[in-house]
Amino acid sequence: MTVKDSISLHQRILTDIADKILSGEWPPGYRIPFEHELMTQYKCSRMTVSKVLTHLANADMIERRRKAGSFVSKPHLQSAVLEIPDIKAEVSALGLPYSFDLLIRRRRKSSQGDRTVLDLKAPGPILELTCCHYAGRQPFCFEERLINVTAVPEAAEVDFAAQAPGAWLMSHIPWTAAEHRIQAIEASAAAGEALKLAPGKPCLVIERRTWSADHTVTFVRLTYPGHLHELIARFAPADKRAGAGSKASANISPFTPRPAAAEPGSAPAPEGPVRRTGRPAAVQRR
């Protein structure tokens, strides 16, 4: 067996197991086959299997227990609530190849629904983008995005075939404030189809608006399969923050319930009008 064949086999075993975990076929707590069973299945050495399991354990996808075997971990794909995550980095942390498909790229005049989610006072051009991000062969995240072309005119010239919209914005447009809204809901028809989820499956949805100076740059809705993702926030009591001289703050805007039907032709809107109560005091650049 050549080195190239060995590397290829390692990646195939890794991808096969990761696919079963990411798809939910092997839920948290599921005991994966023992090493000797995987050796027989893939006709490979114990060293190859051990390397795969070590990789999965380091990515927090499995938990290895002495004499008991290896088990699928609890949700392990983590995002910091007050940060803008890089989806490619999330996938790479699992040791899986990242890719994305651009499903929709459409420049059009903003609708009333678009102006609501982008906090725009007047009609103007927007760019509507829909993508599906993949971890290996498994759909990982469904992205629905609007970009304010008035604030980011150069975006209208980008085809987004080589770089996902979020990554492009992070590398080209400095942002000064962001607002997150997090929900646990059933997948929409479009998200369910892209993520290969059965109707009614729970999802974690993150909606975010981002500003640069006084201009809203983008609104995005990211839908993740609910069994895969969890959100992490680290913070301290208010008096401890004040004592440390921290000047940063995060203001959460209230939302009203979503209308029964969205405006035809418009991108997905949050659950009704958004009332922005403020922006973080600290200017952040990513």
Image (cartoon, grey):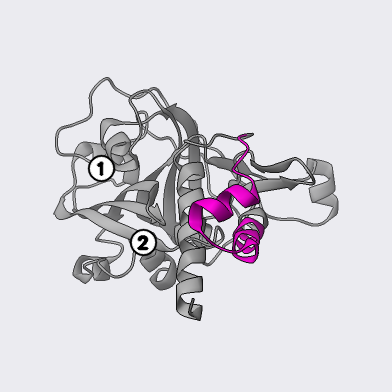
Measured as percent of width and height from the top left, residue 120 is found at 30, 47
Instruction: Answer whether residue 2 is magenta in the image.
Output: no
Relative height, residue 198 to residue 230 (above, below): above
Q: Nearer the viewer, residue 241 or 82?
A: 82
> Would residue 271 be seen by someone viewing this image from the given angle?
yes
Identify the disc placed on residue 272: none
What distance separates the C-alpha of mark 1 from that of mark 2?
A: 28 Å
Q: Secondary structure at mark 2?
A: strand
- Residue at image location 39% in from the left, 49% down from the top: 138
Measured as percent of width and height from the top left, residue 173 is found at 40, 68
Q: Nearer the viewer, residue 11 or 248?
A: 11
Identify the disc placed on residue 114: 1
Q: Nearer the viewer, residue 102 or 156?
A: 102
Q: Earlier in the sequence, mark 1 or mark 2?
A: 2
Q: Amino acid at mark 1?
A: Asp
- Residue at image location 43% in from the left, 56% down from the top: 211
Q: Give the number of the mark in front: 1 or 2.
A: 2
* Residue on which the image places disc 2: 99
Q: Is residue 235 left or right of residue 83?
A: right
**What segment is highlighted magenta in the picture?**
30-55
Measured as percent of width and height from the top left, residue 97 is found at 44, 63
Measured as percent of width and height from the top left, residue 71 is found at 65, 41
Q: Is residue 1 left or right of residue 217?
A: right
